[in-house]
Image (cartoon, helix red, strand yellow):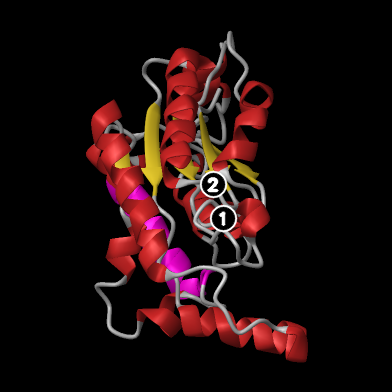
Amino acid sequence: MRPNIVLFGDSITQESFRSGGWGASLADAYSRKADVVLRGYGGYNTRWALFLLHHLFPLGLTKPPVATTIFFGANDAALAGGTSERQHVPVEEYKENLRKIVRHLKECSPTMLIVLITPPPIDEEGRMEYARETYGEKALTLPERTNETTGVYAKGCVELARELGVRSINLWSKMQETDGWQKKYLRDGLHLTAEGNAVVFEEVVKVFKEAWLDASEMPYDFPHHSEIDGKNPEKAFQQKCL
């Protein structure tokens, strides 16, 4: 049986199986070697994600995931008092919620590769443009998210990963290394463009390779067609199937 790689997160994960999405690219990279399982929930924060843990990752699984990405924070970092206040989670609670998620996954499988991904940066003007295009005159003039505040959550995510001994990807910092990142990587100031998805894919693959989950070194689940003898096909399947 192929191993499972689970992508657990908010809308940026939920959208990742769209054309050009980082999850779809990951599924292609691990095709016939691992099954990439999408568990993305648009609008969710870490507080709400805790309610899903025992449903998505029940203890006692005979086949727990070999790897899980945890990609929350974009909604937790919504400003208190803003239009998205319902999603806001204080940064210390955010870190504690991530800690609970990681501990639960380690309880599911001590050998699971766990990767924490920070929220991406926020293009504040891009968010305001999106609000004006979506809501017209009803759009508020105050931001619902800021890049500075999101950076605090990103820092907390990376610090927690270091504390718990798990891998992390600082997407907030990585994207801002590129000039013009605001429009290059973000389509509405928050969610990813095709180029933004490519950055996430590249960073996840890099972390997987640095660990022990390099797709190029993993075996196919069943023989490659070039290994099958047309006159004696059973031979190629004896070791895998019998």
Please say if the residues under marks 2 and 1 sit with CB atoms less than 8 Å apart. yes
* Of residues 126 and 117, the one drawn nearer to the viewer in this rendering: 126
* Of residues 23 and 87, the one drawn nearer to the viewer in this rendering: 87
Q: In which quarter of the view is residue 49 placed? A: top right
* Total labels drawn: 2
Mark 2 lies on residue = 89
Residue 116 forms part of the magenta stretch: no
The outermost residue toward the bottom is 137
Name the residue located 35 percent from the left edge and 49 percent from the top edge: 205
Q: Amino acid at mark 2?
A: Val
Position of residue 152 in the picture relative to residue 210 (left or right): right
Q: Amino acid at mark 1?
A: Asn
In the image, residue 228 sits, relative to residue 13, either above or below, namely above
In the image, residue 180 sits, relative to residue 190, either above or below, namely below
Is residue 14 visible from the viewing direction of this image? no
Q: In which quarter of the view is residue 57 placed? A: top right
Q: Which image quadrant: the C terminus?
A: top right
In the image, residue 88 sits, relative to residue 159, either above or below, namely below
Q: Position of residue 127 (x, y in %)?
A: 56, 79
Q: Which image quadrant: the N terminus?
A: top right
Is residue 71 visible from the viewing direction of this image? yes
From the image, state whether disc 2 or disc 1 is nearer to you. 2
Q: In which quarter of the view is residue 96 placed? A: top left
Position of residue 6 in the picture relative to residue 51 (left or right): left
Residue 194 forms part of the magenta stretch: yes
Kindly report the secondary structure that dominates the magenta region of the rendered protein: helix
Q: Position of residue 101 (x, y in %)?
A: 49, 28
Name the residue located 53 percent from the left edge and 42 percent from the top edge: 7
Q: Position of residue 18 (x, y in %)?
A: 63, 62
Q: Give the spatial CA distance, label 2 vs label 1.
A: 8 Å
Which residues fall within the magenta stretch?
Answer: 190-206
User: Mark on residue 75?
Assistant: 1
